[in-house]
């Protein structure tokens, strides 16, 4: 029973890690989009 629980835990860990990697990749793409849009909106923010 202990070994099975450990295996389950390992599977959960791999799922969570893959989720985190996906989130990280998504965050990187979001940051790229933000940086691209920021270059076009920097002039507007400076006027405020």
Image (cartoon, rainbow, N blue to C red):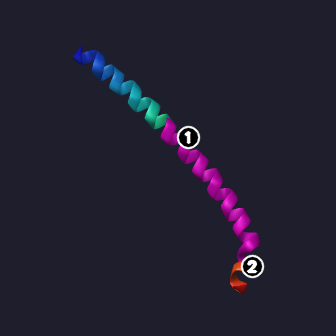
Residue depicted at x 52% and y 41%: 21
Q: CB atoms at circles 1 and 2 under 8 Å apart?
A: no
> Which is nearer the N-term, disc 1 or disc 2?
1
Secondary element at image label 2: helix
Measure how far apart labels 1 and 2 are at the Cα level: 33 Å
Residue 44 in percent (x, y) is at 74, 79
41 in magenta: yes
Q: In this view, does 6 lie to the left or right of 21?
A: left
Q: Identify residue for label 1.
A: 22
The residue range painted magenta reads: 19-42
Query: Residue farthest to the front?
Result: 48
Residue depicted at x 69% and y 83%: 46
Residue depicted at x 56% and y 40%: 22
Residue 6 in percent (x, y) is at 29, 22
Q: Identify residue for label 2.
A: 44
Residue 14 in percent (x, y) is at 43, 30
32 in magenta: yes
Residue 4 in percent (x, y) is at 29, 16
Q: In this view, does 45 lie to the left or right of 7?
A: right
Residue depicted at x 54% and y 47%: 24
Majority secondary structure of magenta residues: helix
Classify 45 as above or below 10.
below
């Amino acid at each position: 029973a202990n070994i099975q629980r450990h295996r389950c835990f390992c599977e959960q860990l791999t799922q969570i890690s893959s989720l985190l990697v996906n989130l990280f990749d998504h965050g990187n793409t979001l940051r790229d989009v933000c940086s691209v849009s920021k270059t076009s909106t920097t002039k507007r923010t400076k006027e405020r």
